[in-house]
Amino acid sequence: MTISIRSVEKKFGRYPALNHVDLEIADGELVALLGPSGSGKTTLLRTIAGLEFPDAGQVLFGAEDVTFASAAARRVGFVFQQYALFKHMTVAKNIAFGLDVRKGAEKPSKAEIAKRVDDLLKLVELDGLGSRYPSQLSGGQRQRVALSRALAVQPSVLLLDEPFGALDATVRRSLRKELRRVHDATGVTTIFVTHDQEEALELADRVAILNAGRIEQIGTPHEVHDNPVSPFVCGFVGEANRFEGTVSGGRFTSGAVSFGANGVRDGAAVGFVRPHDLVLDDGGLEVRVDRVHVQGALASVSARAADGHHIEITTSRADAPRFSGAIKVAPRMSHVYPA
Amino acid sequence: MAAQPARARHPTEDPAWVKVLVIGLVALFLGLVLILPLAAVFAEALRKGVDVALAAITTSDALAAIKLTLITAAIAVPFNAAFGLCAAWAIAKHDFPGKALLITLIDLPFSVSPVVAGLIYVLVFGLQGWFGESLIDHDIKIIFAVPGIVLATIFVTFPFIARELIPLMQEQGVSEEEAAVSMGASGLYTFWRVTAPNVRWGLLYGVLLCNARAMGEFGAVSVVSGHIRGLTNTMPLHVEILYNEYDFVAAFSVAALLCLLAVVTLVLKSVLEIVQPDVKRGGGH
Ligand SMILES: Nc1ncnc2c1ncn2[C@@H]1O[C@H](COP(=O)(O)OP(=O)(O)O)[C@@H](O)[C@H]1O
Ligand SMILES: [Mg+2]
């Protein structure tokens, strides 16, 4: 199911939570809504689900305008931030809920429901836990139950609000892979919300970056990481050293730091250099290494420029020994935006 | 690491003598104000033997009073359970204009003296009241009759269940309901299958409290009852009449029975708290 969000606006009181949001999602795509807390991610997701109605604009599922259709009519699968599992029902009853509520011809037989529940439990690797209650499960297991409950109704779109937010790092990583696997197995159009850029970049086909109720950029993880369209995106997606300075004649200068800024108009500007884009260069900026921290195959170098500006560099572990004392570095790539 | 103190004390724990003093004071107070009078009730009731006490609670007037009390509770409690559930649901899960007013109104019976509550009904339904004449025309008796007693009891016990459920439902939020609705459940289905089961222990707790008060209510019921023996006397009113007639053994016997009903309620409540320790949070599974 393709999903189109057209000029959607939503205010809470006088505060705009969504400001003229446009978004097109292709059938079978896995899209991340990425943004800081309060940027409107949940509101956008709930608007797509029909749990919130926009003040202006349209939401389309395929060619159908569902802007004011009820959540039930949209057939979405929604995974809530805190899972919202039914506490007093077993795991199996939770998963079967969306089928149990159906009436008449639409309602599958008991045996069909039981079979579907079993299949879903297998899909999320929870076989045999159907008779437990949510309180008897770990956080990661609850998350899987929430996911299979949302999938049970064979939704036209699967929506997940910070699905891994409440879990510890290890469980989080394994569930990320799981979501990707489930998505690939079912082919259902999926939108998930996260404030974790690493999660978004790793998991999604495309990432939409929200800031203060607006979509700043939408693109593949590569595009948003390598070609950020705004200082906000550049600072939010991936690590970056940030410099405030001026552009004059196609060159950005901030204290001792200086690099090319082709096509940027003269005046105040802000420049970003990703840690892995800083390389040793005899003609570069002189910095003093404070600390080297090895992480797997990579090494993070904390350094300081002559003017005291803190600079992060990432290099390969093999090259790490060359980063000590006073060194000279230059960016092989940078992003400069008029301030 | 420093050596362990001889006896590890929790940081917020007070010295032993403070605890003993405070607990002792509370026990003394409870003993004087609660246990002693309660024991006195039973002692007085049984002063002339079990037979006399039994005879006192099986006179036709006493039996009528017991019956009326049970009928009153049997109507008032389910009514307030239904109302409390609806009100708590509306207040905790929805936003609507006048919500603050509704919350205040629910508390009204707590802040109004029961006597005043009774008088309100007399004013409205009594002979000289607003609807007095039309009620007589249709041969409907409310004041000095069972309907008045039930109405007054409902009024007085109105807040118990709603008050128990509102914070519980508020704490539980609306995400389970949203989940149900997003999977196609109707509002009513969601209420019965999701909202109500989540508060069932809190509801039971509220019902017990409401029942205890419904059976024991004196003030409001006294005003609307008319004290017609064998017809409009509830157990508390019957106790008062017997007492005023210096029939102490009978008065205390009926009082003891009333106490027993209350004790049963409290025991049920305690059992509930033991088997369902998170009853206050409404948890369950
Ligand atoms: N029900 C609501 N009532 C009032 N303000 C709300 C409500 N829901 C969200 N907001 C506000 O809208 C903004 C966006 O919220 P939200 O979509 O939850 O952000 P995010 O999920 O990105 O953290 C926030 O400033 C939040 O305070
Ligand atoms: Mg959110």
Image: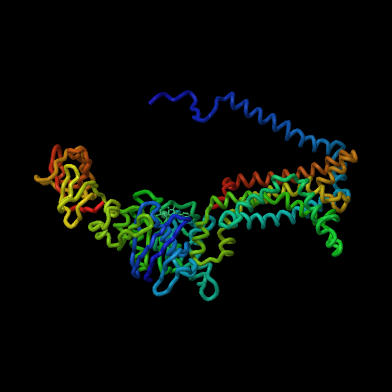
From this viewpoint, is residue A127 visible?
no
The number of discs equals 0
Using the image, determine if residue B12 lies above or below residue A336. Answer: above
Q: Quick one: A178 or B226, which is closer to the camera?
A: B226
Nearest the camera: A53 or A204? A53
Quadrant position of ligand 2: bottom left
**Quarter of the image where one finds residue A148:** bottom left
Q: Which residue lies furthest to the left in this view?
A: A282
x and y, in percent, of residue B16 in the image: 57, 25
**Residue at x-position 24% and y-position 47%:** A242
- Measuring from the top left, give residue A236's x and y in whole percent: 30, 52
Q: Residue at x 9, y 45 (%)?
A: A282
Nearest the viewer among B285 and B116 is B116
Q: Where is residue B95 in the image (x, y as percent from the top left)?
A: 56, 57
Residue A255, by quadrant, is top left
Q: Is residue A22 left or right of residue B36?
A: left
Figure quadrant of the N terminus of chain B:
top left
Q: Give the residue at x 78% y 48%.
A: B220
| Drawn side of residue A169 relative to residue B252, left or right | left
Residue A328 x, y percent position in the rendering:
12, 43
Q: Is residue A269 above or below residue A156?
A: above
Vertical order, A62 against A221 (above or below)? below
Residue B147 visible in the picture: yes
State the scheme by which the image is colored. rainbow
Residue projecting furthest to the bottom: A105
Q: Residue furthest front?
A: A267
